[in-house]
Image: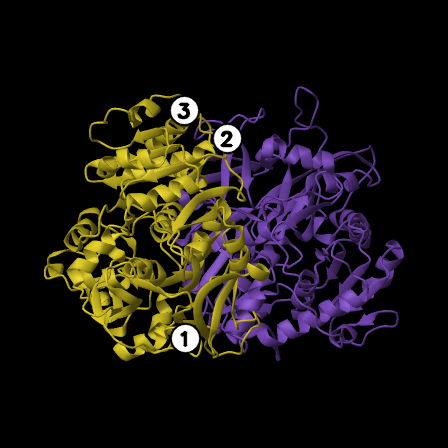
Chain colours: A purple, B yellow
Amino acid sequence: MYLTQSLHRRAQGMPDAPFTVSGDRVVSNRDAVDRISRIAGGLKEHGVAGDANVAVLDLNTDFFFLTSAAIAWTDAVIVPVNYRWSVKEIAYSLIDSAVEVMFVGDHHLPLVDDIMTAVPALNKVIHAGVAETPDGLIPLADLLASAPVEDAHRDGTQTLGIFYTGGTTGLPKGVVLSHRSVLTSATAAIAQAGCPRGGTALIAAPAFHMAGFCSWVLSLIQDQGAVPQAEFVPREVLASVEKYGVTQTTWVPTMIQMLVDHPEVGDFDLSSMEMIVYGASPISTALLDRAKAVFPNCRFTQNYGMTELSPTATVLRDEDHAHPEHRKSAGRPLLAVLLKIVDADDNEVPRGIVGEIVVKGDTVMTEYLNKPEETARALAGGWMHTGDSGFLDEDGYVHVVDRIKDMIISGGENVYSIEVEKVVAKYPGVVQCAVIGLPDDKWGERVHAVVQLADGASVTLEELREFCKAEIAGYKAPGSVEVVDAWPLSAAGKILKRELRAQRR
Amino acid sequence: MYLTQSLHRRAQGMPDAPFTVSGDRVVSNRDAVDRISRIAGGLKEHGVAGDANVAVLDLNTDFFFLTSAAIAWTDAVIVPVNYRWSVKEIAYSLIDSAVEVMFVGDHHLPLVDDIMTAVPALNKVIHAGVAETPDGLIPLADLLASAPVEDAHRDGTQTLGIFYTGGTTGLPKGVVLSHRSVLTSATAAIAQAGCPRGGTALIAAPAFHMAGFCSWVLSLIQDQGAVPQAEFVPREVLASVEKYGVTQTTWVPTMIQMLVDHPEVGDFDLSSMEMIVYGASPISTALLDRAKAVFPNCRFTQNYGMTELSPTATVLRDEDHAHPEHRKSAGRPLLAVLLKIVDADDNEVPRGIVGEIVVKGDTVMTEYLNKPEETARALAGGWMHTGDSGFLDEDGYVHVVDRIKDMIISGGENVYSIEVEKVVAKYPGVVQCAVIGLPDDKWGERVHAVVQLADGASVTLEELREFCKAEIAGYKAPGSVEVVDAWPLSAAGKILKRELRAQRR
């Protein structure tokens, strides 16, 4: 199975149905295949070969999906760019993946000069949008004027994309995923959850993330038209659901909370929604009940996973939510994988005992790009080590307990404490610091900085955030700060974060 | 994905739920994995290596499923034996696949001596059943006493099984299918049709056929307990549905017709049935309406395909049956494949035009065993040539029009005309003959022999049938015979079967 396969089936079986709907701009499946095959032809004319990595820097737009599909059609590899990162971080990922050609959408045109300066090898930037194309960039129209080429019809083992995740070491890691991994994960998730076919999908999570990208892949397979939602503005999202008769979407509980709490939620007709896939954390009973009232015809499915697993590892089906214990879990292992809980020596632990969640199967990543040692560590013994701790209950449901790798999930974004700590530590007067996630009504978790200061030094949240945002993305900057003069320490003298968190929850 | 993967998930998540239910004999998932790993250990002790082909000769029984799973667990290849064949035909398939080890169930013990005589290399026959084990055979208990071995955890490209189909040349062909082909087909079919999870599956089609085997694979993936139905006796099938609370099964319309027409159908509680997957032909409106009345809580899905496609090529979902034209079709292409209609030169024909149905994707067979030329012909250009003719309608639904390869489907069994003709031609006094399928209320199609006799010769149906059954399986023997003294001929002097059929319908 491979990404572009669905395009042929859709163009054959439902040529006039929408591939994407963006306001008044509707691209039918027939037109999509025509455009994609021409953009692919244009890429080849620009010298893009089968092993080339081609970046896409865009909000969720119809152009993102057209150009991503064209890259796969050409026989090249998609490198979605995390636009929430700083230019420095983006440049790192583009250099790491040796990108020479990049698509850019309207919204990010202002970044292009800085990125091209920071990435000398990047010599062709194609502007895919409706704004005027700045000098030096190639308009998409040039590629659309090319002769169409045949789909590469890649076999499943070939690379579909390189998806960057924030690294625990502070450096992003490029997760290499094959066509087969991503398509197997999506197909199995649909088989397991019983997702509807047809309808309209709102792609609301950023598509550069595997969560958002997967939500698009699901919609491709499920023969749904895709409505890209450029940014998650609750009122606009509610309006989109009503306007386009959205039947399926992927959100995190934080997003669901924002929608159901919105003062105008009652003004919208949300009855079209049939399936909400959510991830990143379980959903509270209170929130689920509220969401069921707001979306009266909707089923809810939780998918737990990570980019390295393409991304689904477990599925909590709608029916499972009726069981009070199962509802707290992440569901049962995806039918395409094996999952077990192991101790530090990789031995399986008994049921009910907490250990690391490890996964094996066709959905596991190929490697971390250019990081053989980290790859070997993550895939030790042929199992993907998720870095998450959890246990299996009596019925085989997976309960995710804690993150071994110390990651904060804020508003659906992964924030690695160590990366934030490295910046906070540089703040004038900071002697020692620790960054932890604290429960937050709005974001699920908030990035919380605990700092110890030199005599006479001081810190304000506003100044600390400004300081951090010069180095890292805004969503990673602390949302709260606290000064301490002592730390809970382990025998080895390491700050006990677990204790820090426990004292503050 | 591979066959035994589901066993781990089931043993982990639902250890006490049934793997199989046969009357009072229930094998839980936990026990199944224990037994399978021991049988696998026993096979290894008997010298079965990773590339060995191991045959299974049994009706649909729990032993069939245990031993088949054990073969895959061991790292060997399953060769299900078509027990409807004559010993001569069975021997051909066992010699072709170089089988040295075979499992045999109670029902077929009387055949073993003849088979062993005809297949000198077959030196180990393991009796898997409850009857007394005859001298010279190895009781399954011996293998169950072995130390359990670890699952081979085969990667998807390895061979799962060799499934023999009647060849158009009269010689059976061994269709080599990988784990990935079979599991991809099943998973995609579930994703596309929206099949329920959990419950109880009745495995009513013979599991040596890909249709029956696939029905078991579906049940494995869907976490269903499997109830093997040894033979299709309508009253017993109805009783099984009630007794075991069957929720899903795979039947052909002929079988559905026999059930709904059964005089005692009203005596059984059939309300548990949630999903009937049917194949081999579309279902008539009258039969579907009748079936919906008999199975009030049931959805219907048609899967069209062939062994070479593992086996599903198209899926007609329950919702599709509401559309009067779609109901006549075989549905839309399976989401894991590409399907097109081509002319004799393999060029795609326009929509609505009849041509040969060809399919490409992960579900296509590896090869015909020991038949490189037939493999090359069937897979020309990378597409599986189904030998079926059909067309695509405006909505992308596939309509199967005729069988290019001249096959009769009688009671769900494939009968190749040429094979029957070769035998009929040997009947004393037959000058020329043609065998065609004619519509039959009970069997869907009836094998009909048209013969031209020498002066003074005569034929009766009974004598012709007896004559044929000495050479070929009983279901292949003509169900009716007709004497003619002239033929509709093509310009090349070939009997025009299409015309023969048209005159008689």
Locate residue B13, reporting x and y percent: 40, 38
Q: Is mark 3 on a helix, strand or loop?
A: loop
Residue B125 in which image quadrant: top left
Q: What element carries label 2?
A: loop
Q: Is residue A357 above or below residue B323?
A: above
Q: Do labels 1 and 2 share a chain?
A: no
For label 2, count other residues whose C-alpha is less than 10 Å away and answer few (under 14), some (14-19) or many (20+): some
| Residue named by callout 3 | B46
Residue A449 in which image quadrant: top right
| Residue at x-position 50% and y-position 56% | A277
Query: What is the spatial separation of the Cα atoms under label 2 and label 3, in whole angstroms?
Result: 40 Å
Q: Mark 2 lies on which chain?
A: A
Q: Mark 3 lies on which chain?
A: B
A143 or A113: nearer the viewer: A143
Of all residues, the one furthest to the front in this rendering is: B455
| Residue at x-position 68% and y-position 34% | A376
Locate residue A123, reporting x and y percent: 86, 61
Kind of residue at badge 3 = His
| Residue named by callout 1 | B493
In-image side of A70 versus B297 (left or right): right
| Residue at x-position 59% and y-position 34% | A382
Locate residue A118, reporting x and y percent: 87, 54
Judge whether residue B294 can be spotted in this image.
yes
Locate residue B245, reporting x and y percent: 22, 50
Q: Are marks 3 and 1 on the same chain?
A: yes
Residue A48 in which image quadrant: bottom right
Query: What is the spatial separation of the Cα atoms under label 1 and label 2, in whole angstroms?
Result: 77 Å
Q: In this view, does B273 lie above or below A407?
A: below
In-image side of B426 versus B48 (left or right): left
Q: Do labels 2 and 3 share a chain?
A: no
